[in-house]
Image: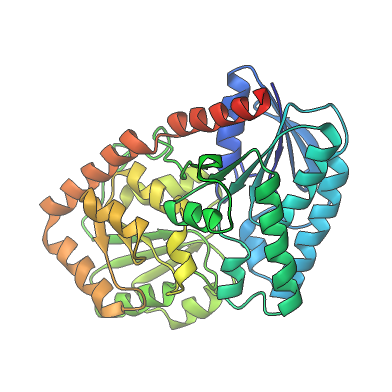
Amino acid sequence: MRILYLHQFFVTRAGVGGTRSYEFARRFVARGHGVRMVTAEGGERTVDGIEVVGVPAGYSDYVGATAVSYPRRMRAFAGFAVAATRAALRGPRPDVVYATSPPLTIALPALAAAARWRAPLVFEVRDLWPEAPIQMGALRNPLARRLARTLERFVYRRSARVIALSPGIRAGVLATGVPEERVALVPNASDLDLFDPATHTPGDRFTVAYFGTMGEANDLSTAVEAARMLPEVEFVLMGEGKRRAELERAAPDNVAFPGAAGSKEEVAALAARANACLTLFKDVPVLATNSPNKLFDSFAAGRPAIVNMNGWMRALVEENDAGLYVRAGDARDLAAKLEWLREHPDEARVMGRNARALAEREFDRELLAERVLELLEEAARR
């Protein structure tokens, strides 16, 4: 089977960001399938058997895209959609088109390629667009909102299958009228070989880690305020983004900002030496539907996961005793929960073991890649 895979932010383990498309694609190749990945920048190359076609438009990393103003970001997304459409319309003919959003504009090359090659489309929704940018205040123009919602509904209707990364995202897709049997849930995954709890052990000082984007959606000011209440605790906030400079200026001495990770291995090393890992978001309803990589990396690392979103994320950590829930925007609650973990090391270790067991049982990358491949093969046969 030949798979035309469209993802603007294609990242390998040597880069920074979510590696889902790389990890899935290389596993498809290992099973004997051909994968042509259309992404932003980088030129044409082969990576682990994946034919990568990088087009000279848009941003190739999500952090860079979220660090600029909203209008500039939207122009970049549109530019990539145009360039990616040209690349997707070149041969060879695929058996299936697999596109992953955000941005929602990836739907344009996906629909064009599916029509050009008379191939089924499998559309993956990692975040609910346009609902997320609307609730975050990024998409304010009424006409732009209507057009985005029209595109959203149109691409869902034209897709043989829609893959949602969380129950909340699946509910959002179903709310547009897509039949339930066409929407599959395949969450983000844990890389069990990379995030190995045995590689490092936490040191004498209790360490709290965050790794990921420092943008408008990530409520890291709460972590900075909690750090001020816990001077004996070390906070390591790894990443880049629009709000990093502001956070660094406000942070006390026990907060370190090492910058963006140079590779996925650096993220794994930080998670392994931490006593707890943070997954924090701004108190915006749509963000509770997220399926964040950092949460599943925390599970794989075997560390208690601290989450501040009600819904699926809270249920995962509480029902599996794999971490703690804190109230969004409540620095005192975060500080209290971290202090409890510090004072109860045995309970914290149990949470870490439960987190790793959860990753192995439900979020193993191998299992989820196989599930997506089955959906692609089913669509291609139909």
Q: Position of residue 62 (x, y in %)?
A: 63, 57
Q: Position of residue 265 (x, y in %)?
A: 48, 42
Residue at 45% across / 60% down in the picture?
289
Q: Position of residue 207 (x, y in %)?
A: 29, 60
> Exactly how many numbered labels are in the figure?
0
Residue 70 falls in image quadrant: bottom right
Q: Nearer the viewer, residue 336 or 254?
A: 336
Q: Position of residue 364 (x, y in %)?
A: 40, 34
Q: Where is the N terminus found, in terms of image quarters? A: top right
Is 238 situated above or below 178? below
Q: Where is the C terminus found, in terms of image quarters? A: top right
Is 88 situated above or below 47? below
**Residue projecting furthest to the bottom:** 250
**Residue projecting furthest to the top:** 32
Is 371 situated above or below 157? above
Viewed as shown, does residue 360 lie left or right of 20? left
Q: Nearer the viewer, residue 85 or 273?
A: 85
Residue at 47% across / 65% down in the picture?
287
Q: How is the image coloured?
A: rainbow
Can residue 278 be seen in this snapshot?
Answer: yes
Is 91 situated above or below 226? above
Residue 124 falls in image quadrant: top right
Viewed as shown, does residue 278 lie left or right of 293? left
